[in-house]
Amino acid sequence: MTVLVPTMGALHKGHQALIKRARELDKEVVVSIFVNPLQFSDTADLEKYPRTPETDIQIATLAGATQVWFPTYEEIYPNDPIQISAGAVGDLYEGATRPGHFAGVLTVVNRLFEIVKPSAAVFGEKDFQQLWLVKRHFKKIEIVSVPTVREFDGLALSSRNVRLTESDRAAASIISKALQEPNRMHEILATEPAFKLDYAEIIDEKTFQLASATTQNKRAIIAGWVNGVRLLDNAVVESNS
Ligand code: PAF
C-alpha cells in the first residue's frame, strides 16, 4: 500500500517530519507537490507562494519519499471541479478570513486520494483546522498527524517564513510565546506592535467551537500577520492552565 504526503512544495523540516512518519507507516511514500489554486482566495498570495521544485525533490527523497509527484492542473482537475463543502466549521477562523479555502483544500485532497488511492495520508498539526476538517471528511483513509516542527525560538516552520525579514522573524516568535500562556494570549500578542492579530482563541478539539469550562480537550489557536505574511499556530492547552 501507499502512504501519501500531500504538500504544496517549498518543503522544509516540517515536511521532512511528515515524510519520515509516512515512511514508518509504509515503504511506498508518494509526496505530491501541487499549489492548489482552489484554496487561495487572494491571487497575489497564490502568485507569491514559493516554488522550489529542485530542492523539493532533494528534500523529499532524502526524507524517504519513493515518489515525488508534480501533478498538472489538468491531471487534478480534468473537468470543472465540484467543490466539496467544508460545512460550518469551514467558515470559522481560517475560513472566515479566507472564504472558500477549506472547500478548496478538501476538493484537492479528495482528488489526490482518488488518483493515488493511499491507505494512509500524513498531515501536519500546524494547520490544525485543516487537519480537523480532513479527519472529519475522509473516514476511509487513515489520517495520521505529526506535531509541528519549530525553530529554535518556537516559530512554527512554514513555507511562508521565507518571506519574513530578520526583524519580522523576531516579531513572529510572539505567537509561540503566547501559546505557552493560553490564558494571557491576547495580552502577550499585544506587546508586539508588528504582529497584526486575526484571532487568538481556545477551542474544543471535539467540536472546533469555543471551549467552555467543561471542555475536556482544549487547543489554543492563533493567526495573524507580520509585515503582510500570514502566520498561524496552535498548541494543546493543558487542563491545569
Ligand atoms: O497543507 C497544505 O500544504 C495544503 O493545504 C494541502 C493539504 C497540500 C492541500 O493543498
Image (cartoon, rainbow, N blue to C red):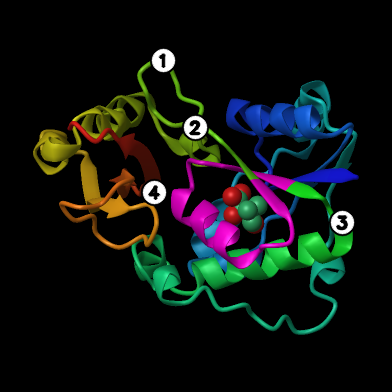
Q: Is residue 52 left or right of residue 163?
A: right
Viewer-nearest of discs 1 and 3: 3
Give the residue type at disc 3. Answer: Val
Q: CA distance from mark 1 to mark 3?
A: 36 Å
Residue 219 seen from this side: yes
* Secondary structure found at label 2: loop
- Which residue lies under the disc numbered 1? 152
Give the mark nearest the N terminus, 3 or 4. Answer: 3
Q: Nearer the viewer, residue 151 or 21?
A: 21
Q: Which quarter of the rendered picture does the N terminus lie within?
A: top right
Q: Is residue 137 above or below residue 6?
A: below
Going 34% across and 37% down the picture, which residue do you hit?
A: 236
Give the residue type at disc 4. Answer: Arg
- Which residue lies under the disc numbered 4? 230
The stretch of residues the image draws in magenta is 121-143
Query: Within 10 angstroms of label 2, few (less than 14), some, or many (20 or more) residues?
Result: many
| Pointers 1 and 4 in contact (C-beta within 8 Å) | no
Q: CA distance from mark 3 to mark 4?
A: 31 Å
Which label sits on residue 116?
3
Viewer-nearest of discs 1 and 4: 1
Q: Is residue 68 left or right of residue 181?
A: right
Q: Is residue 213 left or right of residue 12?
A: left
Which label sits on residue 148?
2
Q: Nearer the viewer, residue 182 or 103?
A: 182
Q: Is mark 1 within 8 Å of ligand 1?
A: no
Q: Is residue 193 magenta?
A: no
Give the residue type at disc 2. Answer: Thr
